Amino acid sequence: MLLEIRHVTQYLYDAPVRESVMEVWMQPQKGAGQRLISFELELDPPAQLFSYADTFGNAVYHFDVPQPHDRLTMVARSAVDTQPAAPLPEALDHGEWDRLRSDFVRGENFDFLRPHGFAVETAALRAFMAEKRLDELKVIDPLRAVLELNRIIYESFAYETGVTDADSPIDHALEARRGVCQDFTHIMIAICRAWGVPARYVSGYLFTDRKAGDRSDPDATHAWVEVFLPSTRWFGLDPTNNVLAGERHVAAAVGRDYADVPPSRGVYKGATDSQLAVGVSVRRARAAMTEPEFIRLAQPASASRNGRRRGPPGGVVHDQQQQQQQQQ
C-alpha cells in the first residue's frame, strides 16, 4: 500500500521566546515490512537540521532556533510503501514460555523486559490484571495469550481524548477506563513484561479505516505494541483497534515507552505560555490533499494534546519550558 503522510506541528507562543531547541521522531522506518520512499522536514523559522540514530536505531532530527520567534512550525512529509504482515501461526507449543525464559532471549531483549517510565506495574495495574484474571492466560501459549490480551484491553477501555495527557501515568486511564492509544499501549506493554514477554512501544501513523472498526483519531499520530516471541520474532498488535499491525500501520520509531520516541520534544527559553496545534493526514498516494487543504488541519489542539502548558512563575529552571505532543 503506497501511503503519503503529512504531519504538521505548530507551537504558538503568547509572547516571543528567545530560543527553541527541538528533537523529532517523525521519519518512517526503513524495512520491517515498509519501504521509505521519501522524507522531508520543513521548518519555519528556518533552521539547520541535524540527524542521528538513537539507541534503538531510530532516525532523530534535531535543530536550534536561536533567534526570537512567536511560533514554530514543522511540516514532515513522507511517502511509504507498506506490505501486509507475515501471517502468524494459529498457536505455538507451550514450551514457548520456557524459550522466553532462556538467558539468550532475556539478554537480547533486556531493555524491553524491564519496567520503564510509563510502562510500569502499579497497584492499579495489578488490580486490573486480577479483575480480568489475566494471569490465567498463561495456561495457553504466549501467542494466543497476547492476542487475547489485545482483545481484552480493547473491550475494557473506551477510546476518548481529553482524559489523559502526554505525561499521564497509566493509572489515570486504568481508573477512568478511558484513554487513547498511548495509554492502551503502555498498559499492554506493562502486562506483557510482567509475564516475561518482551514488548516495545511503536510510534507512528495509521491509515484509518472506519469500515474496519478503527476508533483512532485519523488526524493524529498513533501508537501500538510490538512483542517478541522466539518462534515468531517481533510482530505488532494494536490494542486501540483490536487488530494486528499490518500494511495500514507505518512505524516511525520504537522504544521502551512513549518517553523514548515522542513525535516531537523540546524546550524553549521565555516566561510565556505556549499552545500546540497538530494535524496529521495519512492517505493513499493517489488521493493526497493539497498543501493549503492540509495546513487547515493544524488547528489549536485540545487539552488532551497539551494544548496549553504553563511555565513556572518567573521563568525558573533557567526559564526553559518543555513541550511535546500526545499520541492519539
Image (cartoon, rainbow, N blue to C red):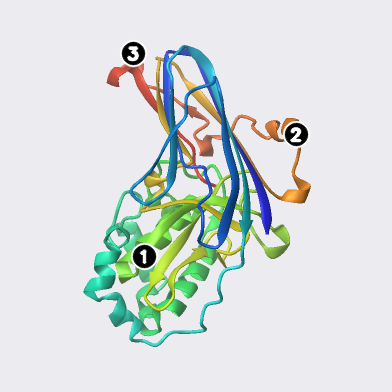
State how far apart marks 2 and 1 are (Cα): 41 Å
Relative height, residue 100 to residue 259 (above, below): below
Secondary element under disc 2, as helix, strand or loop, is helix
Q: Is residue 61 left or right of residue 54?
A: right
Counting residues from the start of the chain, the first of labels 1 and 3 encountered is 1
For image coordinates 76% across by 36% down, the residue present is: 290
| Residue assigned mark 1 | 191
Mark 3 or 2, closer to the camera: 2
The amino acid on which the numbered mark 1 sits, given as a three-letter code, is Ile
Residue 197 lies, in percent from the top left, at 34, 70
Q: Quadrant of residue 76?
A: top right
Secondary element under disc 3, as helix, strand or loop, is helix
For image coordinates 58% across by 64% down, the residue present is: 246
For image coordinates 42% across by 17% down, the residue present is: 19
Q: Nearer the viewer, residue 264 or 180?
A: 264
Counting residues from the start of the chain, the first of labels 3 and 2 encountered is 2
| For the residues bearing labels 3 and 2, Cβ distance under 8 angstroms | no
Q: Quadrant of residue 126?
A: bottom left
Q: Nearer the viewer, residue 150 or 4?
A: 4
- Residue 314: image tag: 3
Q: Quadrant of residue 318?
A: top left
State how far apart marks 3 and 2 are (Cα): 40 Å
Q: Nearer the viewer, residue 174 or 51?
A: 51
Can residue 180 be seen in the rendering of this structure? Answer: no
Residue 282 lies, in percent from the top left, at 66, 48
The amino acid on which the numbered mark 2 sits, given as a three-letter code, is Glu
| Residue assigned mark 2 | 293
Secondary element under disc 1, as helix, strand or loop, is helix
